[in-house]
Amino acid sequence: MRIHRIPLSTNVERLAIAAGLKGVAVEWVDHDPQDRSAILALSGQELVPVVETGEGEILTDSPRILLWLEERHPEPALLPDDPADRREVLAFCEWFNAVWKRPPNAIDAHRRAGRADDARVAAWGAQLRAYQHGFEALLVGRDFLFGDVPSLADMTAYPFLKFTTAPEDDDLFHGVLCEQLPGELPRLAAWIERCAALPRA
C-alpha cells in the first residue's frame, strides 16, 4: 500500500497509527505542502492522505480510508464487535470530523484571510476548551476513549488533541490547536502519552 502524505499532517497520522497497530506495510510518498500538483493529478483533489491500493484503487479522505483499512485488515479490530458499541465509536468519529473540527478550521481560515482575532475567534476557542472536558470524562476508568484498547475513535482524535504543547512545525493550524487546547486535564494528558506510544507504520 502506498500512501501520499505531507509530513506532520494530522489526517495522515491517523493512518500511520492504524496501519502500525495492524502491522500493515506502507510505502510513504512525501510531498511539499507548497506543491500539491502531483496529489491533484493522482486523486483529483489536493488533500492528504491519498492511498494507492494493491488493487489499483485511489482512496482519499482519512475517515473513509480508516474504514477501508479496518475492512481489509480486520485484526486487531479497531471497532467493537457489539453492534451498539460499534455504533457509538462510529458516531464519535462522525461527530469529531463534522463538529469538533469546525472551530479550529474556522480560526485557521479567519487568520489565513488576514483578519484580526475578534469575538468569533474567542467563541470558537471556548468551544474547543469545553469539548476537552468531555474527552476527560470519557477516560474515567479506562485507558482509551471507548475502552481499554485503542479504537478508531482514538486514531481519529489523537493527532489533533495532542497539541497541548508547542507543535513540531510552524503550521498555522497546528499553532491554533496548541493555543486553544488546555493541557492541564490529567486523564487526557495520560491518554495523549499512551497514544504517542502506539506503533506507527
Image: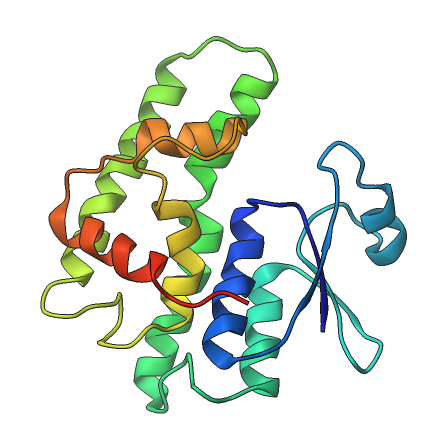
Q: Is residue 2 above or below residue 105?
A: below
Query: Residue drawn at (14%, 54%), measured in percent from left and top?
Result: 187
List x then y, in percent, for residue 97. 48, 54
Query: Residue drawn at (55%, 53%), measured in percent from left and top?
Result: 11
List x then y, in percent, for residue 95. 41, 57
Task: State which quarter of the image contains the N terminus.
Answer: bottom right
Is the image coloured rainbow, by chain, by secondary structure, or in one colour? Answer: rainbow
29 sits left or right of 10 in the view:
right
135 sits left or right of 152 in the view:
left
Q: How many marks?
A: 0
Q: Is residue 79 above or below residue 118?
A: below
- Asked where in the image residue 198 lies, by quadrant, the reply is bottom left
> Residue pushed farthest right?
41
- Asked where in the image residue 132 lies, by quadrant, the reply is top left
126 sits left or right of 153 in the view:
left
**Relative to the observer, which residue lies in front, 194 or 58?**
194
List x then y, in percent, for residue 167. 42, 33
Task: State which quarter of the image contains the C terminus.
Answer: bottom right
Query: Residue drawn at (57%, 46%), measured in percent from left and top?
Result: 9
List x then y, in percent, for residue 107. 47, 26
**Relative to the observer, which residue lies in front, 2 or 90?**
2
- Asked where in the image residue 32 lies, by quadrant, the reply is top right
> Residue pushed farthest left?
141
Query: Residue drawn at (37%, 91%), measured in percent from left and top?
Result: 81
Q: Is residue 184 above or below residue 196?
A: above
